[in-house]
Structures are given as C-alpha cells and as structure tokens.
Image (cartoon, helix red, strand yellow):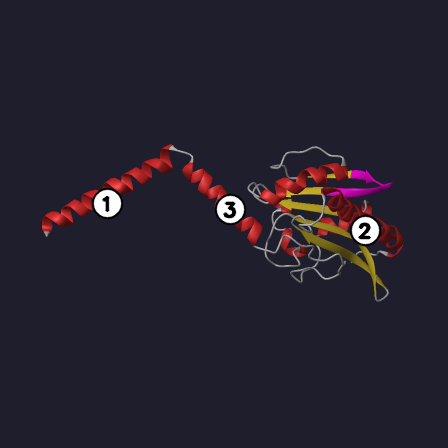
Amino acid sequence: MKKMLAIQIVALILVSGSLGGMFVFTDVYDDVHARIVSILCLSCVKLNRVISLDFTFETANGKDHPDFIIDNLTKKGPIFLSFRTDVCEYCDYMEPLIKEIFNLEFEKEDVFSITVDFNGTDVTFVHINKDHATGKFKDLQPFYDIDGDNAVPMFTTITLGYDRRIVKPFYNTVYGILDSDYTDEQRIEVLTNIILDGIELYNENRPGFIPD
C-alpha cells in the first residue's frame, strides 16, 4: 500500500512538473488566456444585436455627466466615445470601420481625444482602450454603459437634447457588431447616421445649453 502511494505521489509530481514546464516554456498559457478573455469579451452582453438606437438623458450610473464632457459640449461639439480592450475579437473587427467613419489612423492600445470635422461640425472622437486608460478616461464607461455589463466594443455618441424646457446632455450607446446580419457598409451607415443625428440635435439645441 505504501509503495503504491509513493508511486502515485511521484507520478503526480511528474505530471505537475510537465504541465508547469509547458505553461512556462511555451505560449500555451498566453493562448488559453487570450481565448478566455476573448470569450468573456464577446459573451458578457448579447453583442450580436443593436442594443438601442434611442438617445437618453440620464447617465447609466445615475451620476452627473463628467465635467470634461460638459466642457466639450459647451466649447466644441458632440462627442463620440469608442471603448475597447487589448483582447477583443469584435473590437478588432469594428475598429477599421470606426477609422473609416472618422478618417483616422491609430493603434488599438491608444487612449486619446481629437476633434475632427464631421459633415461641417466639430466632433470630438475619444478612443479608450480600458487596459491602458488613466485619469478622466479610466472610469468613464459606467456613465454610458446602459446595459450595465461593462462590455466592449461600446460606442457612445453624446450630444444635446431638449428635456422639459431644459437643454441637457443627450446620448446614445450601442455595442458589438450591431447586428450579425449587417454588412460592413450597413454598420458604417448605422453608426454614421447616429452621429449625424447627434450633430443635428447639437446644432438645434446648443444655443439653449446653459451648463450648471
């Protein structure tokens, strides 16, 4: 009995050592980790559909819109937020379409803000890789994550709307690849139309916007 137990222990040590060596000296761990994270990225929300094409006033977390958002709406124009992470298959799929819409080039790791001319109106484009974001961009997603699942890719257009005689920040959030049946041209069209709607609302309501 003792001999059998000793053999089992030795066998367990050898197997554990082999597995440890495999994870240390090969790319297996990285591959497994990437696959797991990617699956979580795609499954944490039903990303094969459009969440909502409607704009809303109240932030998703019930807090006031961040100061820099209000400042941008006051001095520049509408805002488009693009959220992603390092490992995200749908982010990689959608990002070339976003670049085409805004005529921009950037790397997936980048976190930056730039104002571009979009159909004659200044629109602030903000690219936020959550794995690298710091400062005011680090905790921005919960304000506009209407589905509450912290999912990426997430695209938010922030403009101004008229609510009971008061002009307020007004935003729309969509996720993923929008609809699995869409062509890339349709995805570009849907996002572009949301931005154009945001521009029209902004130009209509900006004269009445008085920040608190």
Label annotation for residue 198: 2
Where is the C terminus found, in terms of image quarters? bottom right
Label 3 vs 1, first from the N-terminus: 1
Residue at numbered disc 1: 12
Tell me the SS state at disc 3. helix
* Relative to 49, 202 lies left or right: right
Question: What is the span of residues highlighted in magenta in the rendered image?
Answer: 116-125
The amino acid sitting under disc 1 is: Leu
The reply to whether residue 50 is visible in this rendering is: yes
Residue 16 is one of the magenta-drawn residues? no
Label annotation for residue 113: none
Residue at numbered disc 3: 37
Would you call the spot at circle 1 few (<14 residues within 10 Å), some (14-19), or many (20 or more)? Answer: few
Magenta residues, dominant SS class: strand
Tell me the SS state at disc 2. helix
Residues at discs 2 and 1 in contact (Cβ within 8 Å): no
Say which quarter of the image contains residue 119: top right
Residue in the foreground of this view, choosing between 154 and 31: 31
**Mark 2 or mark 3, whichever is nearer to me:** 3
Would you call the spot at circle 3 few (<14 residues within 10 Å), some (14-19), or many (20 or more)? Answer: some
Can you say whether 57 is above or below 111 in the image? below
The amino acid sitting under disc 2 is: Gly
Residue in the foreground of this view, choosing between 82 and 133: 82
Residues at discs 2 and 3 in contact (Cβ within 8 Å): no
Residue 119 is one of the magenta-drawn residues? yes
